[in-house]
Image (spheres, grey):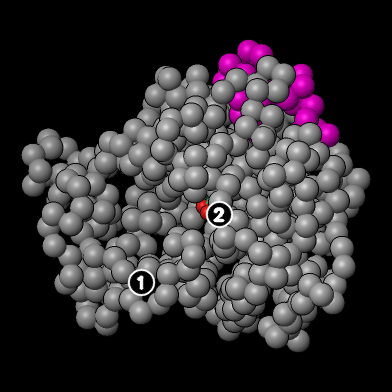
Amino acid sequence: MRPLPKGMRLGVASAAFQVEGAWDAADKSPNIWDNFCRSIGVIKDNSNAKDACKSYEYYKRDVSMVKFLGVDFYRFSISWSRVLPTGFPNKISKEGSQYYSNLIDELIANGIEPVVTMFHWDLPQRLQDLGGWANPLIADWFEDYARVLFDLYGDRVKTWITINEPKQIGLFGYGGKRFAPAINAHGIGEYLAAKNIIMAHARAWRLYDREYRAKQNGTCSITIATDYRQGMTDSPDDVRAGLDAMDFEVGLYSHPIFSEKGGFPESVVRLVAEKSKQQGYPQSRLPEFTKEEIEFVKGTSDFYGFNHYSTKFYSRQSYKPGMFPVPSYDDDLGAAVSLMDYKPAAVPHCTAIPEGIRKSLKWVKDTCNDPPIMITENGFGTFGGLQDDDRVAYLNSYMTEILDAVEEDKCNVVAYTVWSLMDNFEWDSGLRVKFGIFETDYDDEKKTRIPRASAFWYKHLAETRSFNCDYKPTLEDLTF
Ligand code: BGC
């Protein structure tokens, strides 16, 4: 038994679009994912999130599940177009804003802390029509939205996360077409979005710091996908490729906020500038931060929001021009990627390579000024089953590495969050891919939940606050 680090809080997470359903309740306006799901063929199982887990209707049931687990907090997100149907604060939806107020009250009444993500990918379509994250004015719009949320809920919410995973928003939604809004402007869109997302985050953080912190006494930060990327071999070229891949995938978002120097990482600036020049662009496709912007963004964090799912391996030697579209982010990085001899998991973006989480935590400690790290997501996708031994094995092996990172590398991990409380709408994979420690029965009108073995694993950890890496609950022995 290893005691959890003193004060390390435990939680579970979800996101509005993935669980709420009620896509057209009251005066909510459509968001980009509502609309994306209508296009034939973009969601792998052709499902949509019109109902999802019906959390909008049965939020009290979600709270009782969190209570059953005995964890400290519930991380959920707010749907921008549910609270502000026009996207702007000229009109605050009474019913939409009341929903989150009720959820927050219900959590607090049950002794659970609400941890709130302001934006988890479901941008109001009306703002997308004006350019979305490609329009620098979104920093104004986001600050206005943040003000509404601080005013409505800041008396009760003490942990805010501005934006979930800038990389996934930009790379898959603007650079590519896997995610809404599917702009597919590779080599350009992802970098525009990256800068505008960082500016929007910084505006919201500074607003909190300036006008709300003293009276509301909370914390605010951003969540960055911090998967691990390393060289395929020990050759200096491959080692460099791994470091550059970390800069492209993580540093692009963390460096401007957490490093001493600020701005985008030097390797990304150099590589994108070189490629842009070769390709005949008069200036780099990576936008610059002005000196004022660099200073404005630097230090806009109270903790590092850390999501982790996978490790991948990179090689410059195996890279061949033409491997990736030109221009593109992958081509700018200029490295081949592989899983080496590791088996891909059923859901390919979760590779079960536990040592990667320890390396990522150490990378954050070393490159981001040793911040308090809140692990805001970690979890494993499957295709279902209540006796989810594969998920329990994943969680056991990842928790072992996290505790090693704390005890041996002295990483300051202040919280751990399992993704996800329940099966939910897994973006372009639809309803088929399951991340829940509770199963959701989508065939049932009420979308009933049943705890999986992993829910009992987590309950045991929360109860004992000690970690036993051999604990593998058997459902037959347990009841709900
Ligand atoms: C996202 C979640 C998603 C999870 C599993 C994360 O990147 O924040 O919304 O469900 O990964 O794929």
Query: What quarter of the picture does the C terminus occupy?
Result: bottom right
Q: Residues within 10 Å of mark 1 (few under 14, many from 20)?
A: some
In the rendered view, does 248 fall on the left or right side of 90?
A: left
Tag 1 residue: 339
Query: What quarter of the picture does the N terminus occupy?
Result: bottom right
Residue 73 in view in this figure: yes
Nearer to the camera, 224 or 372: 224
Disc with the residue nearer the chain's start (2 vs 1): 1
Q: What residue type is labelled 2?
A: Val
Residue 235 drawn at (x, y percent): 22, 81
Q: Tell me the element at label 1.
A: loop
Residue 452 drawn at (x, y percent): 73, 64
Q: Residues within 10 Å of mark 2 (few under 14, many from 20)?
A: many
Nearer to the camera, 54 or 240: 54
**Residue 97 is one of the magenta-drawn residues:** yes
Tag 2 residue: 433
Q: What residue type is labelled 1?
A: Leu
Q: Is the residue under label 1 in contact with that under label 2 (CB below 8 Å)?
A: no
Whether 379 is drawn above or below 234: the answer is: above
Give the image quarter of residue 248. Answer: bottom left
In the rendered view, does 36 fall on the left or right side of 290?
A: right
Part of the protein shown in magenta: 75-102
| Rendered residue at 71%/65% (across/down) | 386
Q: Residue 273, labelled with which disc?
A: none
| Rendered residue at 39%/43% (across/down) | 178
Whether 465 is drawn above or below 330: the answer is: below
